[in-house]
Amino acid sequence: MKAAARTPRRPRKATNPTQKDPVGVYCRVRPLSRADQECCIEVINGTTVQIHPPEGYRVFRNGEYRETQYSFKEVFGTLVVQKELFDVVAKPLVEDLIRGKNGLLFTYGVTGSGKTHTMTGSPGDGGLLPRCLAMIFNSIGPFQAKRFVFKLDDKNGVDVQSEVEALLERQRREALPTPKTPAGKRQLDPQFADMIDARDPCRAEEVDEDNVYGVFVSYIEIYNNYIYDLLEEAPCDSIKPKPPQSKILREDQNHNMYVTGCTEVEVKSTEEAFEVFWRGQKKRRIANTQLNRESSRSHSVFIIKLAQAPLDADGDNVLQEKEQITLSQLSLVDLAGSERTNRTKAEGNRLREAGNINQSLMTLRTCIEVLRENQLYGTNKMVPYRDSKLTHLFKNYFDGEGKVRMIVCVNPKAEDYEESLQVMRFAEMTQEVEVARPLDRPLCGLTPGRRLRNQAFREELSRKLELRGGPVGAGPEEPSAAELFFQSFPPLPPCELLDINDDQTLPKLIEALEQRHKMRQMLTEEFAKNVLAFKTMLQEFDSSVASKENYIQGKLAEKEKTITGQKTELERLEKKIKTLEYKIEILEKTATIYEEDKRNLQQELESKSQKLQRQASDKRRLEARLQGMVAETSLKWEKECERRVAAKQLEMQNKLWVKDEKLKQLKAIVTEPRAERPERPSREREREKPLPRSVSPSPAPSCGDPAELGDSRVAPRVPRRSNSCSSISVASCVLEWEQRGPSCQPASIPKSRNKAGAEPGSAWPSPARRRGMCWSRVLEVPRDREELEQEEDPCCRSTPVAPLRPRRSRSAGERWVDHRPPSHVPTETLLQPRVPRAITVEAPSERALARCDRYLLTHQELASDGEIQTKLIKGDVFKTRGGGQAVQFTDIETLKQESPTGRKRRSSPPNPDPAGDAADSEWTDVETRCSVAVEMRAGSALGPGFQHHAQPKRRKP
Ligand code: ADP
Ligand code: MG
């Protein structure tokens, strides 16, 4: 029966894309041909070679020439033998082949670098190819299928057929006159006989012994970008040789490339395979000679295909299942010389050929470059495999799966320096290309070790038969016992009766027949015996099988018991797991609830603490406010107390003075009965007194008693009050204020004034008394300012701080000096003080003061509540005797900003005694309006000479 299916070569993409191996690149340095040759390549270590320019090529750089090192997977020096190279480079590829994986091995280098030597070898020193073949047959030898069990089809597939079909085909082919199938054991061609090391025991370690194997070889040559079959049997015409027919490349259903119509020879031994190779080699040589070709310009490709299929379950015959067949291949390529064309001095046709050859190698280079780039940078450039037959044929190795190895052959001679450099560069680049690692072949699924068990059983059977002396079980080579027995049968005598009297022939025949009959009987007996023996053996076998079966069943039962036990255990554990899971679930739920509670409580805590904080801050604010209020109230009360004490003092003083005056008048009446005015002499006395310091017209300050002189800088309070000039000024102020109308007069003042005014005939106080009595004096004089000035004491007239010259009429366009210090801060309130016709100055100048008659100072300070408080201090400008200007302050206006939402106005805090308070406030206002002259001395700078003689606001009289 023939399984007509195609070879199911492993689907192309059954690779592991994550598992990739780089192309293995090895370097072999051949020895120099002559010892006197110049060498340019040195082996540094097991993986590195150093190449240095020979004399003629040396590129001098600062007196040194450049040496380049190249690293490879392994470097083989000149002393390395073929066997060593094979073990490292080719052996793994053969092992892969036997495991059903593809491999590609090629040699690259310039002509004469040792490519062919490495691949093919020389007599007595076989190269990689014969060694690969030897290893394959050493490994699969005993497991080879009968010839024609595997049959390659013309579409790169393989069929399998039964041994009987294979036998029939064998007989059919042997009947044909041509071609001659090489016999298994015959004399080898002496030309290559010693290239195969028959003693080499090299074999693969892992060979599936339950498989049967078939090896096929093919040998092609690519020359001038044409493919030729070197094994093709063409009719040989020695007179006019026909040029060989080129072959074309095709892709099979698994996208593998193959040469159509290429001869693939099934070989059964190393010798046979190498003989086929040698045949192709010879043909190649002949063609080169006949067609005048340069052999080094062609690429030779020797392809070894290994088909393998598993044995059936009995381990007897090959399994007739197409899915189970594996076909792997190893391609051994001896590339053409990589040197450039000019080196070989090719001409005409040869040049074209060489060009093409170089073109193939160039394409190989380009493909490798693009592959490398795609892999390194993740690009997806198209690899130009189709540009040459060589790359197209091996597309699958780079694109699909397999192991690729390259041996770079170099000749260290100096002449090859440049070419060797090129070779090295290409080799280094090739190392960076990665090829997908093929997956391991799956097993057929049948029990392993079938073949061995089968064989062992057969051997055992024959041994037992032999022991019983039976004929069964003899080897197929020797004649069986039965055959020998038949051969020993007595031959029948001639039984032709020619003479009637012949009495010998018949008795002889009878005797022979009798003998034969006897023997037959013996044989029958023997047969019966054998049958019996066989039967007993069978029974024995059966019983042993049965016992084994029983044993196995017992074991099975045991195992089943264990399995059931384990199952119940498993169930128990599963139940336990379930309960635990349930518990975990409940715990998780509880945890979630607790967490929720925790979150809520935390939120509550946070809100409460916020509330507490708010309350604390409110409390702090309230405290601060209360403290402020307490401080303010206590301050106010302090002030009020002071004020009341002062008022009381004044009142008492006035009373004292009135009494004093009365006493004086009384005394005068008693002592001098003349009705004369008592004031004049005292006034005269007063005139004799030196002028007080503060009102002196002299620019230099005197050093009189400050208390006496009323210098406010030294003793600003009581002494000032005792200054008569000041008192006049104060008096004029008070007068002015009084004249403004009764509506604005405080209620308490008229009382005191009336009290004072109740003495119409009271005399002018003596100068000694007038000190500190200005207030009474003021209250006593109910006349206007002009009159007062006219009646002024001569002392005061002679030395006025406030000059007694008639003032300009205020209604008639008075002019103001608006003194705004540079530190003035704009308040930006809607209501701003507006001073018409004012000269605004930052510092008061004499010139400005001379041109104006009114003076306004804008003073700003920070109030106790933190607000800006602006004070407009007003005064009159007078000319002093010294020629300077003096300012007499007359009024203070306080401007204050207050937030409507802020504290209550100062004027409105609850007062326990509203009437008294109002009166006191008025007292304060009156005080506020008091001013003291400021003397501006002529010639003195305004800054230092500007003297305030009184605080604008006074609390003590
Ligand atoms: P290629 O095939 O690269 O043109 P060959 O393999 O034909 O070069 O080698 C040219 C010559 O050099 C041959 O005579 C070969 O015997 C010799 N040769 C090459 N490599 C070695 C080597 N490693 N050891 C000894 N001889 C070698
Ligand atoms: Mg060669």
Image (spheres, rainbow, N blue to C red):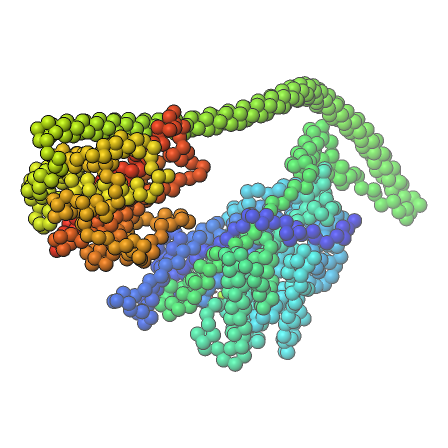
In-front residue for pair 264/664? 664
Decide if residue 585 is in sight here: yes
Horizontal side of residue 626 vs 318, given as left or right:
left
Decide if residue 602 is in sight here: no
Q: Using the image, determine if residue 863 lies above or below residue 568.
A: below
Residue furthest right as drawn: 500
- Residue found 83% across the figure and 43% down from its top: 493
Quarter of the image with the C terminus is top left
- Residue found 28% across the figure and 54% down from its top: 809
In-front residue for pair 908/578? 908
Residue 617 location (% of width, % of height): 42, 29
Horizontal side of residue 426 vs 655, given as left or right:
right
Horizontal side of residue 890 vs 315, given as left or right:
left
* Total numbered badges shown on the rendered structure: 0
Residue 456 location (% of width, % of height): 66, 34
Residue 206 location (% of width, % of height): 57, 42
- Residue found 83% across the figure and 31% down from its top: 524
Q: Using the image, determine if residue 409 lies above or below residue 87.
A: below
In-front residue for pair 49/321? 49
